Image (tube, grey):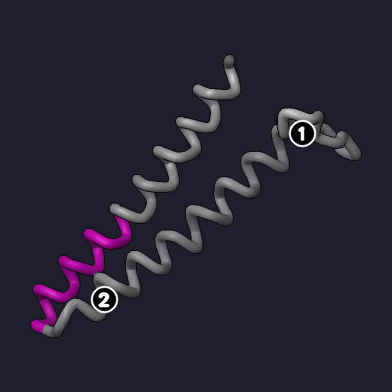
Amino acid sequence: MVWVYRYSGLGCAFAAGVMVFMAGGWLLDRVVGSFPVFMVLGALGGAALSTLSIYRRLETSRGPGEEPNEQGQG
């Protein structure tokens, strides 16, 4: 049951990363006066970086050479 909290936390971290970069793009759009170009780029960049961050967290939580069990837990 602990894995539910772990993966819920990872999902919230992903969403927070996307929202932070999207908000930064929105602010940059307001300053520059452009269409929501930077907001979309921020959302895509935040999604990419959040995915990379979550992947690294999951890989470092497993030991070297350790295979996940049938529930997908490391």
Q: Main secondary structure of the magenta part?
A: helix
Front-lying residue, 24 or 8: 8
**Which corner quadrant holds the C terminus?**
top right
The range drawn in magenta is 20-33
Query: Which mark identifies residue 38?
Result: 2
Helix, strand or loop at label 2? It is helix
Relative side of 67 to 49, left or right: right
Determine the secondary structure under disc 1: loop
State the residue lying farthest toward the top: 1
Q: Residue placed at 50% from the left, 22% from the top?
A: 5
Q: Label 1: how many residues lie within 10 Å, few (<14), some (14-19) or many (20+)? A: few
Q: Which residue is mark 1?
A: 62
- What percent of the width, then of the height, locates residue 47? 44, 60
Q: Residue furthest front?
A: 70
Q: Which mark is residue 54?
A: none
Quarter of the image for residue 70 reads top right
In this view of the protein, which residue sits in the foreground, 24 or 66?
A: 66
Residue 36: x %, y % from top left: 19, 77
**Please, what is the three-letter code of the amino acid marked with disc 1?**
Arg
Question: Can residue 4 be found in the magenta stretch?
Answer: no
Horizontal side of residue 29 vs 5, given as left or right: left
Q: From what the image shows, is residue 70 above or below residue 39?
A: above
- Height in image: 55 above or below 9? below
Q: Amino acid at mark 2?
A: Phe
Quadrant of the rendered structure where residue 1 is? top right
